[in-house]
Amino acid sequence: MNNDAILCSEVNIEWKNKQGILQRKFNSKKGNLRLVRNENANIFIEIVAEKVAPVKLKLSGISVHKKFMNEGKASIKFPEQNAILYISNAPPGQLLSFLRVIFVKMTGEKPGDNSSNTGSRVKLLSSKPNSFEDISPITNAELARAVRKVAKSSETTPSPLASRKRKIERTSIEKAPAAKRLYSPVPNEPLDIEQQEVLDACLAGHNVFFTGSAGTGKSYLLKKIIGALPPDVTVATASTGVAACHIGGITFHQFAGIGSGEASLERSIQLAMKPPTVAIWRKCKHLIIDEISMVDGNYFEKVEQVARGVRRNDKPFGGIQLILCGDFFQLPPVTRPRPGETTPRPPKFCFQTEAWQNCLLNIFELKNVHRQSDQRFIAVLNKIRTGKVDQDVTDTLLSTAKQKIEKDGILATRLCTHTKDADIINESKLKALDAQAKTYEAQDSVPGTTKQLDQQTSVPSRLELKVGAQVMLLKNINVGAGLVNGARGVVKDFREGFPVVQFRNREYIASFEKWIVKTAGGAALTRKQIPLKLAWAFSIHKAQGLTLDCVEMSLSRVFEAGQAYVALSRAQSLNTLRVLDFKSVQVWANPDVLTFYRNLDHTRLIPLGPVNKFLNKEKTIVKKKMPLKSKLLEKPLVNIC
């Protein structure tokens, strides 16, 4: 069976007469949809649900409304049958694949493939009248025909402004692939073997923590996991607002609803019991937490206790499936001094808590690096990650100090250990430019949310630019053309009010883009702004998750474990990196984190696989073999909801 041609979701079908009066309804909380063909090669959607006869709707002359596809919702109108199919609570990844198959199968048909032109020979050879078979997978020929038809039909007469803008983009991005936005419901590239094993474990219902060095595709995999789970019972969170916005979720603190967590357990439960927080807690079946390394262990433990109290369930986290992602070798939790003290307390990681142990997490470590392709650089980063600096690492990084990485007027972004330093550099450099400034004010959907959107998105509420300004792109616009989040450029001109930016071998006119931030109550805040930010300098904290193609750094003021590693791993390659004053004392790893990962390595029988929880306070770990394939057979993907 072609998995892309099946879907599990909530289903509602309405049949109306020509006057628009409702004649018949079909409702199911758990409906299984699949694409089938009959003996005449007509394509149908077959809907199967418990206690009702299967329904078949012919795909002919349909129209699809897919605006809310990233929320697991879509509707299909069948005019010939006066019916509308409403799909909701579908895993967004499955829904995207399902609609893509419909599109390609219908658009990619050869002339004469439809029922009106089906030859009598096909009908006569059909051995089973009124029989239906599963639709075949998409072929390359069908895909090619669909692409040709879409390209031909898209040739419309644009407005003068749009025409000029497209002309510039066509000449500056010649032969670039069609735009592929990674902030669509789910990314489209296939998973590697390591990533697929993690996804299988999540879909089998296990509590999972997956980790890996920078650039191993953790965020990419997380989006795939989110896209494979039903949205109505899945809550995607992250330790920071920017990380939450990146995965289309909310912050872990927003979800918990207990403020800073300093209140007593009883008071915290009372806070979480307030509507609408309590409704989200009780509805949640799958809780995702990204950048888990930056979640304070004490807070994590408090939230786990609150979960059991609010859900009235004594299982860990009240019976919610946990899917955790992050690298404890990267930035640790931010700690503050206790009352009466001047120095912050040492960070407490989540893996040091009893709650972590009780959750029986299956732990995976991704090994395949996607961000960098230079094996020498990867080897250096792996040593830096664990705090090991030998002579080869030192020589390699010192050799970058004098190399020229600037190109086409694009200067290297300076990574700073402190945010204030980066802000001062950017403001002074912009002020020094002898050119007229142009200001862009963000368009926020809800007045009074500017401060919240500033914290939860990477895009500024007020952007001031001049010709010559060094900028960074904050959206994936065209991956194939190199116009990706973190790409570096310089403003060359302003045309029709928009900045023209020269990236590496690419010129791009930056227009308004949209960022969506979800609230704990399920509402959405939006910000429209030019997807650029001043980039003479950037803080290491705000660069986490980015891939920079022209970066320099001074690590003399590094003040916490993992900070040097996060900074160095932002670089795409050694050829695009300049380290000004490297010393081995700038690199170290937290000893507790080293112990945690060392124990994982000692117990792993294969490079990747699930590992049982810590069994005692000495952090002894035991390998647990899990028959994931058999588990998946018991819980097939189509029945995940």
Image: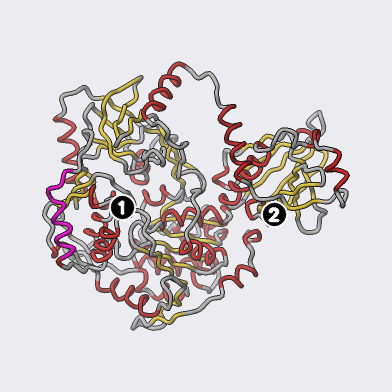
Give the amino acid at mark 1: Gln
The 10 Å Cα crowd at callout 1, few under 14, some 14 to 19, many 20 or more, is some
Looking at the rendered structure, the kind of residue marked 2 is Lys
**Residue 238 % position (x, y):** 40, 56
Q: Quadrant of residue 14?
A: top right
Place of residue 623 in the rendered image (x, y in percent of width and height, measured from the top left):
45, 80
Image coordinates of residue 575 in percent, x first then y, are 23, 49
Q: Secondary structure at mark 2?
A: strand
The front one of 104 and 620 is 104
The quarter in which the N terminus is drawn is bottom right
Looking at this view, is 383 or 624 the one in front?
Answer: 383
Residue 211 position in % (x across, y down): 39, 65
636 in relation to 245, above or below:
below
Residue underneath mark 2: 29
Which of 578/491 is in front?
Answer: 578
Residue 399, visible in the rendered structure: yes
**Residue toward you, 2 or 175:** 175
Q: Nearer the viewer, mark 1 or mark 2?
A: 1
Q: Left of 304 or right of it: where is 601? A: left
Give me the disc on residue 559: none
Q: Secondary structure at mark 1?
A: loop
Which span of residues is magenta-colored? 392-404
Q: Which residue is mark 1?
A: 544
Query: Looking at the rendering, which quadrant does residue 458 occupy?
Result: top left
